[in-house]
Image: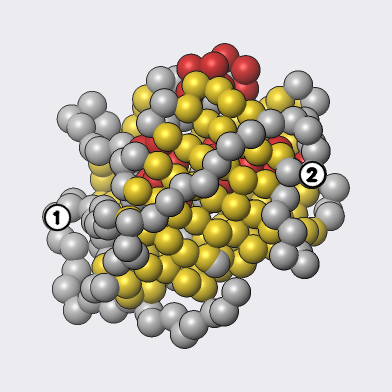
Amino acid sequence: MTKQARWGLLLGVLLCWGCAKSTIPFQDKSSMEDFSPVTATYGYLQGKAKIVLEEDSGKITRGTLHVRALKDSLLWFSISPGLGVEALRGLLSEDKIQLRDRIGSQDLNLSYAEFERRYGITLSLTLFQNMIWANLPYSATYEDRLVRVGKKFELTQVRDKVRYFSKTDTRHGKVAELSISSLEDKGTILASFPKFQDLNAQPFPAEALFKVAIQDSDGLHHFRIYLNWTELDTQANPLTFPFRF
């Protein structure tokens, strides 16, 4: 698998803008006393982020990530490492994962079930969206373990042989830390969201750090991905999602 394809896989597994604007920190005078986490509200969404990828070899690559989304339907992204050249384009739908490697030749066109059989990781469009926007990975049920520790609610969930451990901050109702680990030792994701911005009176991540361990046919790979969101628009007009092999 080429490096560009791995970029797409990692953003998909996290799955996950050039002129930066000032970030308005999210501030809420109230505090979440009961467990009522906040979920991002939007129809269409588009944005841009600065992305930094650090590989287990120590190599660091910087680039730009463009995102377009139709909530609960489509998530499109494009990555350009530099000089305006697109290296990778991806489209995630309710049914499948599609990646177009524009530098190499290893494209990807798999259903989520096929992806799980090949890489040992259970994914869905809903999970992608929730990881990107610091939502709970899944809605809490009576089967989950929930405790409050200081200013955070700690929630442990097990779904499809994967354990999800999240810490929701009472100050804004969003996930501040998330750990995803396969019960069969097939991969892990550690995510942290240190800063949130105010977007139309909603808390959205301003920064995110992902530590990823994923296994493919070449073995186990470790990555660190840093995102600095510079543009976000939840009131975009209906968007197109260009993609073809």
Instruction: Answer above or below: position of 92 versus 28.
Output: above
Quick one: 167 or 23, which is closer to the camera?
Answer: 23
Dot 2 surroundings within 10 Å: few (below 14), some, or many (20 or more)? some
Write the residue at 23% across / 37% down: 140
Mark sitting on residue 34: 1
List x then y, in percent, for residue 142.
18, 30
Dot 1 surroundings within 10 Å: few (below 14), some, or many (20 or more)? few
List x then y, in percent, for residue 17.
54, 67
Quarter of the image for residue 82 reads: bottom right
Quick one: 171 or 98, which is closer to the camera?
Answer: 98
Under mark 1, the amino acid is Asp
List x then y, in percent, for residue 115.
56, 22
Residue 86 shows up from this direction: yes
In the rendered image, the quadrant that contains the C terminus is: top right
Under mark 2, the amino acid is Ile
Quick one: 156 or 187, which is closer to the camera?
Answer: 187
Mark sitting on residue 103: 2
Quarter of the image for residue 157 reads: top left
Mark sitting on residue 133: none
From the viewer's perspective, is 244 left or right of 45? right
In the rendered image, the quadrant that contains the N terminus is: top right
Write the residue at 43% across / 61% down: 46
Kindly report the distance in space between the C-alpha atoms of the residues bearing marks 2 and 1: 49 Å
